[in-house]
Amino acid sequence: MLINLLNISPRVSFDISPRVSSQRACRASISARDKSRHLSGSIPSEWGLLPLVNITLLGNRLTGPIPKEIGNIITLERLVLENNQLSGTLPPELGRLSNLKRLFLSSNKFRVILKTDQHEDFPYK
C-alpha cells in the first residue's frame, strides 16, 4: 500500500508493504521511494503508532529531532537515518526498541550529553 505521510516535503509516496516472513508475521517497512534523495521536513511522530519493522531514510534533508514516539515501535528491527540534518538529543525511548538489529544515525547534527565524575552535564560537539 502506498501512502503519503505528513511532515515530509515534497510530498513523496512511501511504501508501507506488508510482507510475510518465514514465521508468517506481517512485516511493514517505510523506505523513501524518491530516487533524488532530497526529502525534507521532520519525521512524523504518528509513525510511532505503526507496527513497522524497517525505517530507512538514508541521505535526505530531514531536520528536527527523532520523535520519542519512535521508541513505541517495538517491532522495529532497522532504523536507518544517517546522512540527514537531524538534530537535538537522542530520545531515551529508543532504548525500548528491543528488536532493533541495525541502527545507523551517523552524519547528522545530534547533540550528545556526557556525564562527568562530578555529575555535571556538558555538551560534546
Image (cartoon, rainbow, N blue to C red):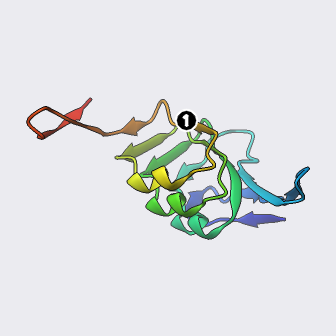
In which quarter of the view is residue 50 placed? bottom right
**Above or below: residue 124 compared with residue 62:** above
Q: Position of residue 63 (x, y in %)?
A: 46, 48
Residue kind at label 1, given as amino acid type: Glu
Residue identified by numbered label 1: 82
**Label 1's element?**
loop
Residue at 25% from the left image edge and 31% from the top image edge: 124
Image quarter where the N terminus lies is bottom right
| Mark 1: few/some/many CA within 10 Å (<14, 14-19, 20+) | some
Q: Position of residue 77 (x, y in %)?
A: 67, 47
Compared with residue 65, is residue 124 higher up or lower down, i.e. above or below? above
Give the image location of residue 14, x and y in percent.
Answer: 74, 56
Answer with left or right where residue 95 lies relative to residue 125.
right
56 left or right, relative to 71: right
4 or 43: which is nearer to us? 43
For the image, the number of numbered tags is 1
Q: Is residue 108 left or right of residue 102?
A: left
Residue positioned 39% across, 47% down in the render: 90
Which is nearer the eye, 30 or 115?
115
Figure check: 84 above or below 97? above
Picture quarter with the C terminus: top left
Q: Is residue 73 left or right of residue 110?
A: right
Looking at the picture, how far across and down is residue 38, in whole percent? 62, 42
